[in-house]
Amino acid sequence: MPYTTEEGGRLNNFATEPKMYEAEPPDPSQKRNYLILGGLAFALVGGLLVVAISVS
């Protein structure tokens, strides 16, 4: 575990940093899946609103 010695002899421990990488843009099939899931989520929320309004 990496550590540094501060003034007065105190040790300060640091967590190891994770290896960084660049995110890759989604491919066309992932974009299609995002659109489908977004549509389903929109329909679910819309349906819940319709039920809530009709019940009240």
Image: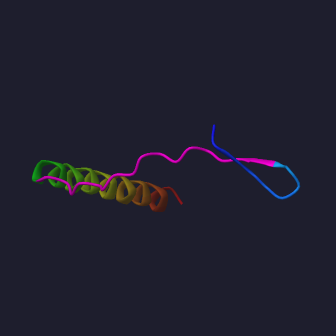
Locate residue 52, reporting x and y percent.
48, 57
**From the viewer's perspective, is 30 left or right of 23?**
left
Question: In percent of the image, x 33 and y 52: which residue is there?
Answer: 21
- Between 15 and 29, the one nearer to me in the picture: 15
Locate residue 5, reporting x and y percent.
76, 51
- Between 15 and 48, the one nearer to me in the picture: 15
- Between 7 and 15, the one nearer to me in the picture: 7
Q: Is residue 25 above or below residue 13?
A: below
Dominant secondary structure (helix, strand or loop) of the stretch shown in magenta? loop
Instruction: Report the magenta residues as a range.
Output: 11-27
**From the viewer's perspective, is 39 left or right of 52?**
left
Locate residue 24, reporting x and y percent.
23, 54
User: How has the structure been colored for display?
Assistant: rainbow
Question: In percent of the image, x 66 and y 47: which residue is there?
Answer: 14
Locate residue 35, reporting x and y percent.
21, 56
Furthest toward the right, the residue is: 8
Furthest toward the left, the residue is: 28
Furthest toward the top, the residue is: 1
The C terminus, quarter of image: bottom right
Q: Answer whether residue 46 is magenta in the image.
A: no
- Between 32 and 41, the one nearer to me in the picture: 32
**From the viewer's perspective, is 6 left or right of 35?**
right
Question: In percent of the image, x 47 and y 62: which residue is there?
Answer: 53
Number of marks in the image?
0
**From the viewer's perspective, is 15 left or right of 41?**
right
Which quadrant would residue 1 be assigned to in this image?
top right
